[in-house]
Amino acid sequence: MNLPAGNAVIAQSGGPTVVINASLVGVIEEIQSTGIAGSIFGARHAVRGMLDDDLIDLSELSGDRLDLIAGTPGATLGSSRDKPDEEYCQKIFSQLARRDIRYFFYIGGNDSADTCRIISEVAKKAGHDLKVFHVPKTIDNDLVLNDHTPGYGSAARFVACALMGDSLDNRALPGIKIDVIMGRNAGFLTAASALARTEHGTGPHLIYLPESVFDVDRFIADVDRVYGAMGRCMIAVSEGIHDESGTPIAQRLAEQFSGEVERDAHGNVQLSGSGALGDFLSRLIRDRLGKKLKVRADTFGYLQRSFADCVSSVDAEEARASGRAAVQAAAAGLEDASLTIRRISDSPYQVEYVPIGLREVAGKTRTVPTSWISDGCDVTDEFIEYATPLVGPLPALGSV
Amino acid sequence: MNLPAGNAVIAQSGGPTVVINASLVGVIEEIQSTGIAGSIFGARHAVRGMLDDDLIDLSELSGDRLDLIAGTPGATLGSSRDKPDEEYCQKIFSQLARRDIRYFFYIGGNDSADTCRIISEVAKKAGHDLKVFHVPKTIDNDLVLNDHTPGYGSAARFVACALMGDSLDNRALPGIKIDVIMGRNAGFLTAASALARTEHGTGPHLIYLPESVFDVDRFIADVDRVYGAMGRCMIAVSEGIHDESGTPIAQRLAEQFSGEVERDAHGNVQLSGSGALGDFLSRLIRDRLGKKLKVRADTFGYLQRSFADCVSSVDAEEARASGRAAVQAAAAGLEDASLTIRRISDSPYQVEYVPIGLREVAGKTRTVPTSWISDGCDVTDEFIEYATPLVGPLPALGSV
């Protein structure tokens, strides 16, 4: 094979996961192994590092060191929320050309795929031979054409283990408990709470995804019904639940209860990093069903994407394999691609890594299929079958 | 040895932990092994089950089943927050006598030790031979005369792993992050956040325990200093922080920002099961240091005592051994006792289980020694040395 000369750059973008470094390591070890590039540079804080030429040489990292890094949460290169436009990408490209970068590996979500697309187009226009690869990463699992994405399995495992323990706690000391789970538009992570149901009668009893319209009256009736029947009620709810108009419930309840709403730079109501939605739902339940009810809310927050002691072995392996597959695609001569995960068998669970065009995945969002949502407050067995192999073996439980 | 006739009852009280069932199993397997009692009954929902004769026969549970139960979070017998007075204990005693209960094992915190004391006294007055044993359990680690308590190690592990991952997340995408940790009066759990500092520069950078007065101005100055120096700031704060008068900060900030304060039946401001304190501190920082700062807060909540995938191996083993030690003390002829854990060696880490009088531990609260608190916003190396062996081996991390 006639390998092109030049160097490689790798970066990590968007919200970190517990396996995003496994993908980084997959890319590094496969470049080391194939020898397709001279130096392997890591860009600090994603596109910002490329813009500022803030690069670190990763070429000589040893296998032992790489194994440790692969098992470490958070983006070790640093991340960024910047979403570069064409001008930004033009500047990045100039820096990369100066460093004789010929391979560009970008680990991130659908925005990152779009950045890859723009960079690739800028390079083509300039007649610079730059191979551009997107390695998927998102706990939201919202990339189209992927069976699932690296990062989801471990976050889903966290949610399942959290609901497993919290449901047992709730069975021991009954009450109404609300757990708020990440996911503004896609409910895959909230749906994973259903995996906690390893024993009869354990929760969650109600699951609300952002794919369904959240009807406050219906919610109160659901809680009343479950609590009436069981004397307790475990609720898993997505931070992104919204009313018919698409207005987040977090925003409506904030207006109702405190008159204040916090927004980010894009005008989106801030959802993560606050316990507000859970607290508002607690107040709503007490207002409607009784002031003396024991109602508690926890918001899982950043732990879902960063907790150091809860990694899906399947997810960790696939994240690393995705990184390696991107390098293999580059070595095979592809110009650019996003490395999707396809499931080729359910039993035994088996996947393959398929490169597809960047345009096919860039900027698009996948949500939980309607057919996997049951009655607006649960998920179907089909979802359970889909998600079970992704989270790795869950703790075995027993009871008297 | 002349073993008394009669049966045994076991119960679990107060907030569950991930190892409270390990203590239950320790008691059961040691009664099975020593044969000191005929039937082994478990009381559903602690003293309530004893009062209502809601007992379950645990005598025939197999070793495999016991192993599964030992690894399961939550109190499998059910728990209760009831704190029985003498009249309540008199009624319990009548029920126990009717069932010919001669051994009483109660797994719980310092309130449970006090319940044991009352039950033991009632039995003595009635001339009924009842041996009463308290098996410590609390994530707060606030029992006097114990080096530490079963339940603490695993909760501390959860906090350490959470801060470990969250600090790496914060390093990747810098900002100000507040993590609110359980513990109304004792800061041992919040202090465990310091165990997350496995690499230079990782957080938490500031740690606030309820043992120190929380000065809002000092807090803002601390955050400003760290954020100014590092461009990010990880803060671990106890839910129980309070001002000079002892008023919880949660209450003061609630009054300041929303005018509403939620109290429990005892008039205590509700601390757990809400994200309010973290959200209030976020607003405070933005109000004082800049509206545009990225400030996020997570409240770890019930996950700290129930998360199914984060158990300290040391804690699990000691919880089970504590249960066994209680039965051994009974078999050795003791009338009543609380089974304390004493550390007999730091290197290698080694403990022993020492029965002490119920009165010595009942109703008393231990807090973090002042000498382990550093400058009001950190803990000392002495605390780190104390806590390290309790959480089990933490995940090994690496970075580029």
Image (cartoon, coloured by chain):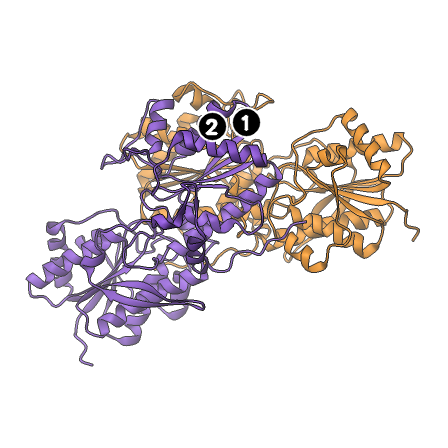
Chain colours: A purple, B orange
Label 2 secondary element: helix
Residue at the (68%, 39%) spot, across then down:
B108
**Disc 2 residue type (three-letter):** Ile
Mark yes or no: residue B198 visible. Answer: no
Check the residue under mark 1 and report the chain it is in. A
Q: Is B276 placed left or right of B364 in the picture?
A: left
Same subunit: marks 2 and 1: yes
Query: Mark 2 vs mark 1: which is more N-terminal?
Result: 2
Q: How many marks?
A: 2
Label 1 secondary element: loop
Relative to A136, does residue A27 appear above or below in the rendering? below
Relative to A357, does residue B128 appear above or below in the rendering? above
Q: Are marks 2 and 1 in contact (CB under 8 Å)?
A: yes
Residue marked by disc 2? A285
Q: Nearer the viewer, residue A326 or A247?
A: A247
Relative to B325, does residue B287 appear above or below in the rendering? above
**Residue A331 in picture, x, y percent from top left:** 23, 74
Mark yes or no: residue B336 visible. Answer: yes
Q: Which mark is residue A293?
A: 1
